[in-house]
Image (cartoon, coloured by chain):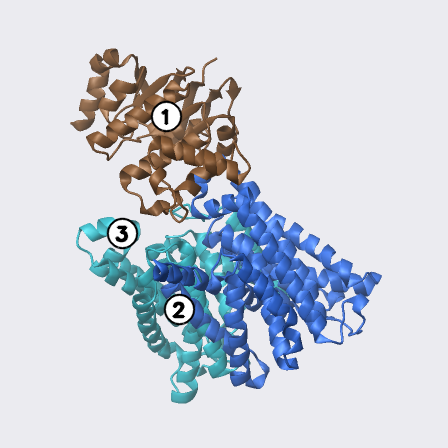
Chain colours: A cyan, B blue, C brown
Amino acid sequence: MSLMAVGLSLIFGVMRVVNFAHGDMMVWGMYLAWLLASRVGIDPYFGFAACAAVLFVFGLLVQRGLVDRIVDAPHEMQILLMLGVALILENTALLAFGPEPVRVRSPLAAATWYLGPLYVDVARLLTFAVALVLTAALYLFLFRTDLGRSIRAAADNPYGALVIGTDVRRVYAVAFGVGAACVGAAGALTAPIVPFSPSLGLSASVASFNIVIIGGLGSLLGAFIGGLLVSVAESLGAIFLAPSLKELVSFSLLIVILLFRPAGLFGKRVP
Amino acid sequence: MRWLGVAATAVALVLPAVLGPYALAIAINVLFFAYLGQAWNLVGGYAGQLSAGHAVFVGVGGYTAAVLAAETGLTPWIGMFVGGALAAALGGVIGYLGFRFGLRGFYFVLLTVAFAEVCRIVVSNWERVGGAVGFYITFTGDPRRLSFQDDRAWYYIALALLVVATGIAAAVERRRFGIYLTAIREDETACEALGVDTLRYKLLAMMLSSFLTGLAGAFYAYRYSSLQPNAVFGVPLSVEIIIRPIVGGAGTLAGPIVGSLILTPLGEASRALFGQGGWHGAHLILYGVLLVAVVLFVPQGVVPWLRDLLRRRSA
Amino acid sequence: MSALEVRGLAKRFGGLQAVKDLSFTVGEGEIVALIGPNGAGKTTVFGLVSGFIEPDAGEVTFRGRATRGLKPHALNALGLARTFQIMRPFARLSVVRNVMIGALGRHADPRAAESRARAVLDEVGLAAKAAQPAGSLTLAERKRLELARALATEPVLLLLDEVMSGLNDRETEVIIELVRAVNARGTAILLIEHVMRAVMSLAGRIVVLSYGERIAEGRPDVVARDPRVIEAYLGDEA
């Protein structure tokens, strides 16, 4: 969840493009992982890299081919564009995989461990661990490598970046691709934990927007922390209210946050 | 331009005489979704406030009319307006919250979607109105209870709705209200500095739009004899509502109508071609592709593009 | 009764005190210029006076009425109009429509508003471009459009924010004449300007701002010789 939000924050923070297709990209990540697992026999915990790679390329293509053309257009256009992409993604998934929920079984994660009085679901632990590692890797990339620094520079000040010779278009493309890769990985990693179907796309997108807004736009740390917070809130919601109302919690939370603190907890930018 | 509208209406009036039942059903849908699109157009097109959760008003309108009819025997003809009023109230709430707190663009979109989803989930879990299965509407065939044996009745109702909505939009366009809205869409801050109470006008547009959309709820419920929360509050319906005016031309009078003329038959065709397995998602792929294409190549919509084309030809 | 009275105005943004204990007046029919080096807080003052920003402290009185809590459109209805430093035309609307937005506040009937708008366009010399989309105008034309829109609201006090920046000599002269004509009809003017020639020829009084504080006030020739003013500008260059 957090990883996904970080990816989204990256895309939004860098390009101010609102990616409505985010959730649906994640769902494709999930399905790819499923494909790998069931057809080729690769465990999602190893296959996520492939999913990430595929989605990276997809993100790059989408950015270059579509988003790039309308960088200067009013925001509504960008929203509509990504909405269109989301529609395409979600419904091709429906077409390809059917509407029934699907589960991926990972042999690696079948066990549960006992840690004192608690028992821990290995699958979730593994997912969390890998997500943590990936987030750390992302952090390193953004803060230690030249390309990463370019991305952050372009996010803060696109014109300034242009002036010092950054190929802004390339940077945008990479940023979008990385964001997509994050989401693809997130999908693959989450696949063993929850049953999923294409209709998950919308709630996933909204959830990640939730997280990004709560954590603060443009702040990756915020996205990560936001992800943790929202997951906790949702779980609490599921415990105290009926499970089907779990989504209610996240949407209501979104409304409240939108109204009162759109800049989020760590946000650098007020809308 | 006006004679074109009159001519089109005249044609539309006699059309049922020549259409077979399947074509008639499609025509009803063309008119109905054009109406919905025109209603949305008021706030989404002219005022430029992108609401992606407009289905919530259909849901509120429909459920209100149906539940009132079932519980109190109130004829849906009146229940329709009660539903519309409730929808307008909800629109006022959403609008007030959104506009008062300064939510624009993306944030407003998110707010509208969130509200729609909240309503959907609430209604899905509300056993009294049928829960997730939906509210059952008995087919009575009684015109006084908004139920007809003959599809042609639905056709004329849909046509009337569309004509009224278009008339309202035309009136709004001409008056100060409409002119203000188009400026608000361009730059709200400049508007404020020029004496325009942007909050008031955006709210008005929102409530008018949601009222009209709410009316459609009763139409939907009784025409299709079904009310399911996922169908009537969900994002797919919202997409159906907004895509016609967007493709046709948001903020133009003919946009939603042209959009519906293009998209409804296309949707039907793709549904017929791909619709195995009982789900209707294939046409949504088409919508997605069209949406992307429009944004990239014809961002203002088909009607303005045609207008430009004609202007350049005659110049 | 003065057109505008500002007393003890203050505003802080985060760590920056943008405006500090500022007081000045603009009399009826006066032309007052607000000058100062960049970042002195001048546009913030405009925002505070026109209702876009809420002050931390102090009062603004417009035509004898306290303005606290009034939204910009309400102030405009009372007779206060402003232009923006970064211009905000309604790009997709025609030039005449742009000006109509201003006029509709005083003439609710669109036809009356349109004839009023055309009259204003005549005055600023944009009548020929009335039907064109505002986005197609040149910089100088946009400045005049910005002015026209504000004029259409029939203001008693007009706030002009750097309405002459980026213009050549001839274009500047045109605007100076326009402003003078508007003032001759009784409209008070408060202008922010860096173009000194305009300031000197138009202003009856100058208020000098530096780091949010008023450091000098008075007639143009007096202020121009004030050592504190010179230091504020030169110090900024150093």
- Label 3: which residue? A158
- Label 1: which residue? C19
Res. B119 in view = no
Q: Check the image and name the residue furthest to the right.
A: B73
Say which residue appears at 22% left-offset and 52% top-offset.
A161
x and y percent of residue A268 in the render?
37, 47
Camera-nearest label, 3 or 2: 2
Say whether marks 1 and 3 touch (CB < 8 Å).
no
| Location of residue A96 with respect to B184 vertically, above or below | below
Badge 2: residue crowd in 10 Å (few <14, some 14–19, many ≥20): some
- Label 2: which residue? B293
**Where is the C terminus of chain B found, in terms of image quarters?**
bottom left
Say which residue appears at 49% left-offset and 46% top-offset.
A261
Q: CA distance from mark 1 to mark 3?
A: 30 Å
B211 on left or right of B256: right
Say which residue appears at 57% left-offset and 66% top-offset.
B8
Q: Chain of mark 1?
A: C
Label 1 is placed on what type of residue? Val
Question: In the structure shown, which secondary structural element does the residue marked by tag 2 occupy?
Answer: helix
Label 3 is placed on what type of residue? Pro
Camera-nearest label, 1 or 2: 2
